[in-house]
Structure formats: C-alpha cells, structure tokens
Amino acid sequence: MAEPWAETGQSKAQALALAVNNLLGNAVLLCSRGDEQVHDYFEVGVLGYGAKVGGALYGTDESRLIVPVGHIAENPLRVDTVTRRVPDGAGGVISEQQYLPVWVDPVADGATPMVAAFTAIEPVVESWCAAHPSSFPPIVINVTDGMSTDGDPRDVVARIRKLATDDGPALIFNLHLSGVQGQQVRLPNSAAALSDPNAALLYELSSELPPAMLEAAAAMGYPVQSGARGFLYNADATTVIDFLDIGTRSVTPTGLAELTAGDSSHTEPLDPDDENDTNG
C-alpha cells in the first residue's frame, strides 16, 4: 500500500484513506435531515490489518468495532483545513478554505493476514445480525493490494456469508488494488478476465450485487450484468470512491430516503500492507 497509485500522485494508502474519509463524510451528510441532527440509519466500522489486526476508525476499539453514524459525525480524529478552487458564479474560480473531517489516517505496515481480518469481523457480523434481524444485511468491504499471507480465507468468508438478517445474507465485497498496469475489471459476473490468481480468489469470495445495488451501479454508468459481483481489480481512484459509496447510497434504489425502520451495517476491513506483498 506504500507504492504510488496511478494518476493520484499519492500512495495507495493515502488515496484510499482519502476515499474512506470522503465516504464517511458523505455518510454523515446522507443521514442529516436538515434539522442539525444526524440520524443513525446505519453503523460503520473500519478494521485495519497488517502488522496487527484491529480497529482503524477513530473512536473505536476491540470491544466496539462498529459505531452509529451519529458517533462518527461527533468524533473525527481531527478537522483539516484545505484550500480548494471553486467556481465564483461568474465564470471564474476563487480559492476557498474548506474544512475536511478526518477519521482514518493512511498506514502501510506489515503483511496481509486476511484470514485473521475476516476472523475478527465474523463475530461482529454475527452479533449485529442477531441484534438487527429486520435490517438490511451487513456489508463487509475488503480492500487489499496483495495475497493473503496467513492462509486461505475461503472457509471464514463462507461462514460470514451464511450469517443473515431477514432481508438476506451478509455481503462480502472485495477491492483488489493491483500494481499491474492494465485494464480495469469492474463489477464482473465472471472471472474470465482475471489472469492474476489472487484476483480470481477475491472474485470467488465476493457476493453478487443485490438488485438495488445492481440498479444503482447501472445508474452510475457501469455496464453491469446479471450476476455481477461486488469486486474491483486494478481500479482507478474514481471507481474506488464509487464502489465504496454504493454500499451507503443504494440500500434502497433512492439511497437512504426510504430507510425509516432500522440500521444497515457497513464494515470495512482495510489492508495497510507493505512491500512484502506480491503487488506492493
């Protein structure tokens, strides 16, 4: 995760941390209803794995890996001030200072203990499903740029995918940040285009997109077909941001507008690995 990521001018870890912070900020906005109150329509957690496995989201720990979105709104790690050029309304641009909440910092440290990461997530998903039986099922997004260094994750992922709410089984999505130059593979319904065996494994581990997410992806311009899975390979930064955003915006086809009956869990294990991995 320390190697440069395409055209971003940043490392994979830096660009991914920015994408996750943007996602969390968007989640807060989506749950704000104009009354200066953030409604807890879903819960979020970030699990880092590399030299160690543990909570990477500020304000969480091993005893509480996921928190309501309202907690996220109130507990950023810090708020950075950034200068951005924005339209001035008269055909020109002006420089404007904006505040950017930060919950996750970039880390590139250690191997890729994917089995340990999914094993840590399993009881969290199990207890969440038991506590929220009528809700949309949890979404686990695994982000990595290499192969699992502690064994085959198929068994633990299969167990997680058997956990369910009344609305369906838990969803496992995978995002493989490859260092190889080549064509992107986005939300495929087949592994035929994947020559990298690690990518093929992650495709195998990925859940099919539920109908609402399939529709949302199509509306965003992705040429998805029936059976498309929540999997990206060699994706650019824009696609990664879209991919992360689908989980929060497409619980229903119109986003969160219909979510009045409960929460949706969105748990993301992030892989902050280093040059010891096969892909960087």
Image (cartoon, grey):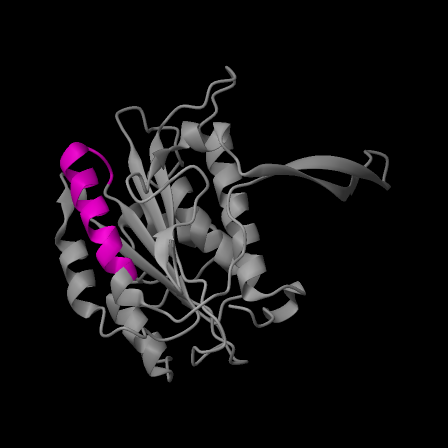
Front residue of this view, candidates 224 and 69: 69
Name the spot of residue 10 as percent of width and height, x first: 64, 63
Judge left or right: residue 265 versus residue 273.
left
The verdict on residue 37 being magenta is no
Highlighted magenta segment, given as a residue range = 117-136
Front residue of this view, candidates 52 and 115: 52
- Which residue lies at the image location 35% right of the left edge and 62% below the top edge? 174
Q: Examine the residues drawn in magenta and state their main secondary structure.
A: helix
Name the spot of residue 158 as percent of width and height, x first: 16, 62
Q: What is the quadrant of residue 161 in the picture?
A: bottom left
Judge left or right: residue 5 versus residue 56.
right
Name the spot of residue 167 as percent of width and height, x first: 18, 40
Q: Is residue 277 above or below residue 70?
A: below
Q: What is the quadrant of residue 63 in the picture?
A: top left
- Which residue lies at the image location 45% right of the left edge and 59% below the top edge? 222
- Which residue lies at the image location 59% right of the left edge and 65% below the top edge? 11
Q: Is residue 275 visible?
A: yes
- Which residue lies at the image location 33% right of the left edge and 63% below the top edge? 225
Q: Is residue 225 above or below residue 211?
A: below
Q: Is residue 208 visible?
A: no
Q: Is residue 231 above or below residue 217?
A: below
Front residue of this view, candidates 208 and 146: 146
The verdict on residue 128 being magenta is yes
Name the spot of residue 85 as percent of width and height, x first: 79, 44
